[in-house]
């Protein structure tokens, strides 16, 4: 089977966006400015964001999408991860880059990039996901770093970012194999050798900024149903962030409705993930596909 044409388009736009990000994102922009400008640029080029643009500063590792009131600026000392995605008709390209002006983090950043390259060369000859994790872990260790052991890459399916198989960032035996035509993302996260090496949920007091619809169930509450319909029309099962819908629903009201939908298990919230010892984390990610015996890097 050939790669659906939409995957190729999504991958190409994600790749072009990487160039745009490296040229246009700089200190001291705000996280909000960065996320909104990336999403606007994706739209301007005819695509749609596959999920809310994640901006992770230092120990903030994943699932943080800035909201309207976020005035945080990226600084010259920060390690900044930008995790973004593009989709066409639900076919997703998921990719991430890390940027820093801090010399202290150069080696961590470069090693993470190398870990992704090492993983890619393994997957070309060995489809066992545990072996991919092993290569990532070995690259980290040799340079004195650690991988985040509870975050992993994943297969992708139409309208589904995490489709079932995980691609660990550590060696793990008895893992599933990648099969021909699987589309998947590999995403090593590396941190300092002295760090805890795993992520935890940010404290419950910090806002959840990423959600997705689990099911399209009627609630008989008019405004809940209206929100579910709105999300379904805009996103289907793809993740979203309250910022995208605050104009239509109002910020405070939207937050209340989302909490209620979460309580009813119609919507799922993804808490922000932070490194357990708050050590800086770097990440690189590509989406790719095994086509026969060859590996196609989509992003
Ligand atoms: Mn990603
Ligand atoms: Mn991913």
Image (tube, grey):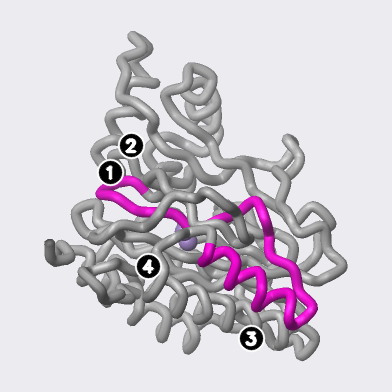
Residue density around tag 3, few if under 14, some if 14–19, many if 20 or more, within 10 Å: some
Dots 3, 4 in contact, CB < 8 A: no
Q: Which residues are magenta?
A: 131-160
Mark 1 or 3, nearer chain start? 3
Residue for badge 3: 110
Q: Is residue 69 above or below residue 7?
A: above
Residue density around tag 2, few if under 14, some if 14–19, many if 20 or more, within 10 Å: many
Q: x and y percent of residue 42 in the render? A: 32, 69
Q: Which mark is residue 231?
A: 2
Marks 4 and 1, how far apart in space? 23 Å
Dots 1, 2 in contact, CB < 8 A: yes
Query: At numbered mark 1, what does the secondary structure look like: helix, strand or loop?
Result: helix
Marks 2 and 3, how far apart in space? 38 Å
Who's the residue at 17% across and 65% down the image? 3
Who's the residue at 82% across and 57% down the image? 196
Q: Is mark 1 within 8 Å of ligand 1?
A: no
Residue for badge 4: 287
Q: x and y percent of residue 73 in the render? A: 68, 70
Mark 2 or 4, nearer chain start? 2
Residue for badge 1: 234
């Amino acid at each position: 089977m050939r790669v659906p044409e939409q995957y190729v388009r999504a991958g190409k736009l994600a790749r072009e966006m990487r160039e745009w990000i490296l040229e246009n994102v700089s200190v001291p922009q705000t996280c909000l400015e960065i996320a909104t400008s990336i999403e606007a640029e994706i739209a301007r080029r005819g695509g749609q964001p596959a999920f809310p643009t994640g901006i992770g500063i230092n120990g903030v590792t994943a699932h943080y999408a800035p909201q309207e009131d976020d005035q945080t600026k990226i600084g010259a000392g920060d390690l900044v991860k930008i995790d973004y995605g593009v989709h066409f008709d639900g076919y997703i390209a998921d990719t991430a880059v890390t940027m820093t002006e801090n010399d202290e983090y150069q080696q961590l950043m470069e090693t993470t990039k190398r870990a992704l390259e090492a993983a890619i060369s393994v997957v070309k000859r060995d489809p066992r996901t545990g072996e991919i994790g092993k290569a990532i872990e070995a690259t980290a260790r040799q340079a004195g770093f650690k991988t985040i052991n509870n975050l992993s890459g994943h297969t992708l399916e139409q309208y589904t970012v995490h489709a079932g198989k995980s691609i660990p960032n550590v060696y793990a035996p008895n893992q599933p194999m990648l099969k021909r035509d699987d589309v998947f993302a590999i995403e090593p996260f590396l941190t300092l050798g002295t760090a805890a090496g795993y992520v935890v949920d940010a404290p419950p007091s910090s806002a959840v900024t990423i959600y997705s619809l689990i099911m399209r169930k009627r609630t008989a509450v008019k405004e809940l149903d209206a929100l579910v319909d709105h999300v379904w029309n805009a996103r289907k099962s793809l993740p979203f962030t309250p910022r995208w819908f605050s104009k239509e629903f109002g910020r405070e009201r939207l937050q209340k409705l989302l909490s209620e939908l979460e309580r009813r298990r119609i919507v799922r919230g993804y808490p922000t993930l932070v490194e357990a010892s708050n050590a800086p984390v770097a990440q690189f990610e590509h989406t790719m596909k095994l086509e026969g015996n060859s590996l196609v890097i989509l992003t």
